[in-house]
Amino acid sequence: DQQVKQNSPSLSVQEGRISILNCDYTNSMFDYFLWYKKYPAEGPTFLISISSIKDKNEDGRFTVFLNKSAKHLSLHIVPSQPGDSAVYFCAARGTSGTYKYIFGTGTRLKV
Amino acid sequence: ETGVTQTPRHLVMGMTNKKSLKCEQHLGHNAMYWYKQSAKKPLELMFVYNFKEQTENNSVPSRFSPECPNSSHLFLHLHTLQPEDSALYLCASSQDWAFQETQYFGPGTRLLVL
């Protein structure tokens, strides 16, 4: 059973518009979340993170929102640029027992 | 070189072969990881080494054997693999195997088992 789900395998957005990538999780013990971006033939690169003590974190064009009650995470990219075309993975981690990250299956964004 | 490097980038092997994947990190980190990414599946953590000691083995079959001679190098020894082991194998490192540490990934080795 997947604990971290990215239900949209792909997303297409026009240049200059907002891209919204979504991620849902099931484990209420998760309290730290990350987004990674992956280009073809490269490893994932860290993009932005958020702790459960916050509901928003912003870094330039990238903003991550966390809704703990809904167990939902989203990444907003504004404005979207062609160079943002990549696969985006969300990952979640608990803080007790094991520190391992659980990854979603990714969403392919095309701008 | 900077960051996390992996060699080879591509590998084709038969089920009776023995091969090794190599990972090197130039970030001064103390924790290193092996992940497997199969088609349309999420990244799966395989092994974790922290200060050269294995701290996590995620129920990985014994045909995969990790080795961490020092904090900068990590190997994955492969023997008698199955076709379903074909996947992208990613190495990552972080400062420590601890709370809220960002992991930095290498480019991966794409493995095909015939």
Image: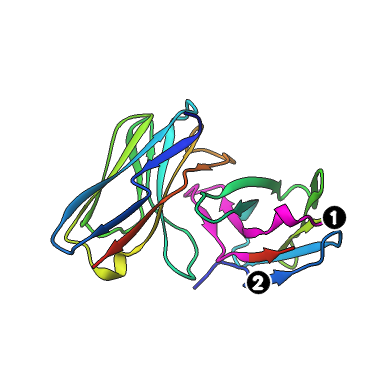
- Whether residue A29 is visible here, answered yes or no, is no
Instruction: Pick out the residue farthest to the top.
Output: B28
Measure the C-alpha gap from mark 1 to mark 2.
Answer: 18 Å
Tell me residue B109's x, y (percent).
Answer: 38, 51
Residue A105 against residue B91 in the figure, above or below? below
Q: Which of the chains bears the disc numbered 1? A: A
Residue B61 against residue B24 in the figure, above or below? below
Closest to the observer, A41 or A8: A41
Q: Which mark is on residue A10?
A: 2
Where's the C terminus of chain B, which quadrant?
A: bottom left
Element on which disc 2 rests = strand
Q: Amino acid at mark 1?
A: Pro
- Whether residue A75 is visible here, answered yes or no, is yes
Image quarter for residue A67?
Answer: bottom right
Q: Which of the chains bears the disc numbered 2? A: A
Q: Give left or right: position of B108 versus A24.
A: left
Tell me residue A9's x, y (percent).
Answer: 62, 72
Find out whether residue B26 is within the magenta segment.
no
Image quarter for residue A81?
Answer: bottom right
Residue plotted at (43% across, 50% down)? B108
Highlighted range, magenta: A80-107
Q: Which residue is mark 1?
A: A79
Residue A60 against residue A18 in the figure, above or below? above
Residue plotted at (47% across, 49% down)? A98
Question: How many numbered dots are placed on residues in this image?
Answer: 2
